[in-house]
Image (tube, rainbow, N blue to C red):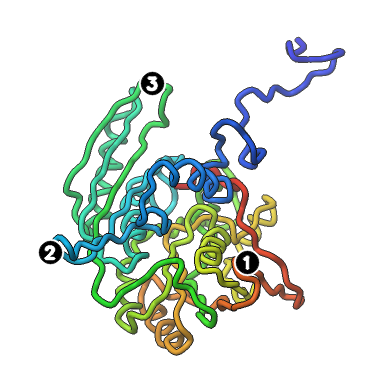
Amino acid sequence: MADPTSVGGSDLPSFEGWTCPLPLRDSPTIVMGHGGGGALSSELVEHVFLPSFRDEALARLGDSAVLDLAGLGGDRLAFTTDSFVVRPLFFPGGSIGELAVNGTVNDLAMSGARPLFLSTAFILEEGTDVTVVGAVAERVGAAAERAGVRVVTGDTKVVESGHGDGIYVNTAGIGLVPDGVDVRPDRAAPGDVVIVSGEIGVHGIAIMSVREGLEFGTALESDCQPLNGLVDAILGVTRDVHVLRDPTRGGVAASLNEIARAARVGIELDERALPIPDVVANACAFLGLDPLQVANEGKLLAFVPPAHAEAVLAAMRAHPAGLGASVIGRCVADHPGLVAATTGFGASRVVDLPLGEQLPRIC
């Protein structure tokens, strides 16, 4: 029988329920692309949230806010919050539980802080199996122990069936920033060496392979891991580290563009130096994706002055979370706010901020 939507006897596909990750820029409603960490996310924050909240610490747009408590008799405190809506809940190399802990720990570490305490809030959908909730909670506890942080408070809410996706998790974290550490996006300076801690694009492709049932010829696991130990190793070499950033949503491309614009510097990459594993490169070629825009959950970018670059690189490679660390580029005074990459053929291309999201629901 012909579909009711057929015209002139020809069956047409139904697009009911479809969403576009790359919508028109002037969309009057929230779309999936607003959560992708790209240009739409940036515009939402800039035009909706920042004018509403009007706070100096928030306006810096770091992974966490660094709050000076000297007037209250204390030190500098790092504070961050994040929400996790990944699908599926369990995936090769991790789960929503590990993501919730590691993502928050890493956001604190990217400000140079030593993570100490976490909160966690579970939003549960009616009908979700209690054993699944218990398994996620166990993963949260194990990940916190591995990262050396304590889960000290939390909350639980339940929503009606059909109004959630099993489990959503919100976390917040607190850490202390050591004396002499000043890590923030606008400190990037011409001459800084850009180092990445390992292979990129792994998490996003691992999630996509499980969710869509794709096989790429080899097992691929998420890189989800805590990075506070790696940051300790970096700061053990020098506290003169300008920027740290974990390139999650929007990938390396989004993180570098945000840093370039915050510091008003140019960034030049060497594409041949980018550590992109073959399975990620092949999957991206098959799916029409850019590996630089694919999410990571256990990698960091470090901007360090050239005088310290070799020592920092060696310290990163000596740590389990930084074994694959490599130099991928430099900051320059030219083309401020723009990221450019030199290709293997010697040409140059602009690495732009992604508009929406390539891989929905990766964290």
Q: Secondary structure at mark 3?
A: loop
Q: Residues within 10 Å of mark 1 (few under 14, many from 20)?
A: many
Q: Residue at x 49, y 72 (%)?
A: 196
Rounded to the nearest angstrom, the CA distance separating label 1 from label 3 is 45 Å
> x and y percent of residue 132 in the render?
31, 35
Q: Are marks 2 and 3 in contact (CB under 8 Å)?
A: no
Q: Report the disc number at residue 338.
A: 1
Give whichever of 306, 132 is nearer the camera. Answer: 306
The numbered mark, 1 or 2, whose residue comes first in the sequence reads 2
Query: Which label number is shown at residue 73?
Result: 2
What is the CA distance from the residue labelled 1 to the residue labelled 2? Answer: 41 Å
Q: Earlier in the sequence, mark 2 or mark 3?
A: 2
- Residue at image x 38%, y 44%? 53
Identify the mark at residue 161; answer none if there is no mark: 3
Q: Residue furthest bottom?
A: 307
Tell me if mark 2 has few (under 14), some (14-19) or many (20+) residues whose alpha carbon lies within 10 angstroms of its own: few
Q: Is residue 227 left or right of residue 295?
A: left
Question: Who's the residue at 77% across and 21% down the image?
Answer: 12
